[in-house]
Amino acid sequence: MTDLEIIVALSHEFGSEDYVKGGGGNTSVKNEETLWVKPSGTTLGGLTVDTFVAMNRDKINELYNVETPAVAAEREELVKNLMADAVENDAGRPSVEAPLHNVFEAKYVVHTHPALVNGLTCAKGGEAACRKLFPEALWVEYIDPGYTLCMEVRKRIEQYKSDKGQEPALLVLQNHGIFISADTPDEIRKLYTHFMDTLKAEYNATGVSQTMEVAEAAGDKDVTEQLNTLLGDDAAFTACSSLFNVAPGPITPDHLVYSKAFPYNGNLDAPGVEAYKTERGYAPKVVIAGECVYGLGNSQKNADLALELAQDGALVMQLTEAFGGINYMTDAQREFIENWEVESYRSKQVG
Ligand SMILES: [Zn+2]
């Protein structure tokens, strides 16, 4: 198998819904000169050998030394252009996490957001539990994704290397997910199995269920019609399931991108919905009404994803009980994501 065939196989294995939802997660393979990384706006499960973005590693390395503007939006714009400049084929725009993939010396990197892992990363006691269960892992507290995250993690990896003589194979990001890196695909699989099995054992030991019962539901036609009247295009399509415990606040960037930070559970009338929109600055994507939870979108796919991520968020919240309960993202962390053009690009593309 070629390197690209191997990373495609890994992308499909770790592109299942146990590991990622929607366009979440990304993978890469590298040699000395080139990094092949998942394009932005694609899904892991849909990758082929022809879809990876080939990037010049020398050019990516220049990013680490460039002086960047203090304003977040300007900085991300500059970084986006630098990254576009490093692309050597016409496979599209690289994942925003590409510069972080390039930091690892290891050949293969598989980054995912499994609910089982986010039960740890989104928990109040997540860091302490991570240090105890995975002393070899590098835990990094929540940092705004993109350039800021990449630069800080790069520093931490350098520190880890000077302390331990090798780079970390496991990078655990608070309220986000996990990066696993290795020189062989079997080592990637082994590390993932170890990480997931250790967590499963911990959930079992603490009596926290790893599944959440949700039934498909047809939904109430009056409710969907009312939502469409109130929200127009934003509720042109709906997805529906039985009630579950929707996370009442922001837990990870992906949950924000697909489901928004806050569900709507007020009256289905214009004053209620307008008050939500005025307070939040956007229409809700998840609505709790009657005996159902609704995902809303301007396409069926977006409505399905809104509901799917809301269900994943509820499972994550349930799992955090094993580690002291849910730790929400702060307002500043949430607002960075809500304003992030790159992410809105992604949800548009995937949707
Ligand atoms: Zn991620």
Image (cartoon, grey):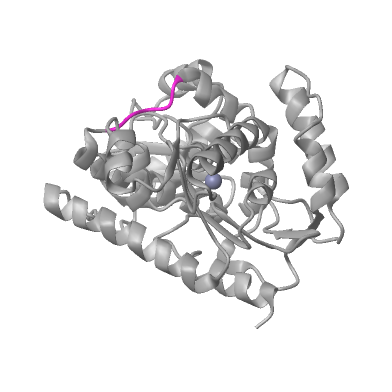
Residue 102 on image: x %, y %: 69, 50
Nearest the camera: 280 or 261? Answer: 261
Residue 328 colored magenta? Answer: yes
Relative to 307, is 50 above or below?
below
As drawn, is 101 to the left or to the right of 17? right
Residue 86 on image: x %, y %: 85, 49
Residue 126 on image: x %, y %: 31, 36
Quarter in which the N terminus is drawn: bottom right
Nearest the camera: 190 or 309? Answer: 190
Counting the numbered discs, the total is 0
As drawn, is 118 to the left or to the right of 34? left
Q: Is the magenta stretch mostly helix, strand or loop?
A: loop
Name which quarter of the figure residue 190 lies in.
Answer: bottom left
Residue under the image location 65 percent in, 58 percent down: 42
Name which quarter of the figure residue 92 lies in.
Answer: bottom right
Q: Is residue 315 visible?
A: yes
Residue 176 on image: x %, y %: 46, 41
Nearest the camera: 109 or 164? Answer: 164
As drawn, is 42 to the left or to the right of 31? left
Relative to 213, is 286 above or below?
above
Residue under the image location 60 percent in, 34 percent down: 155
As drawn, is 233 to the left or to the right of 128? right
Relative to 345, is 141 above or below?
above
Look at the image and give the residue range highlighted in magenta: 326-330
Residue 231 colored magenta? Answer: no
Q: Is residue 293 visible?
A: no
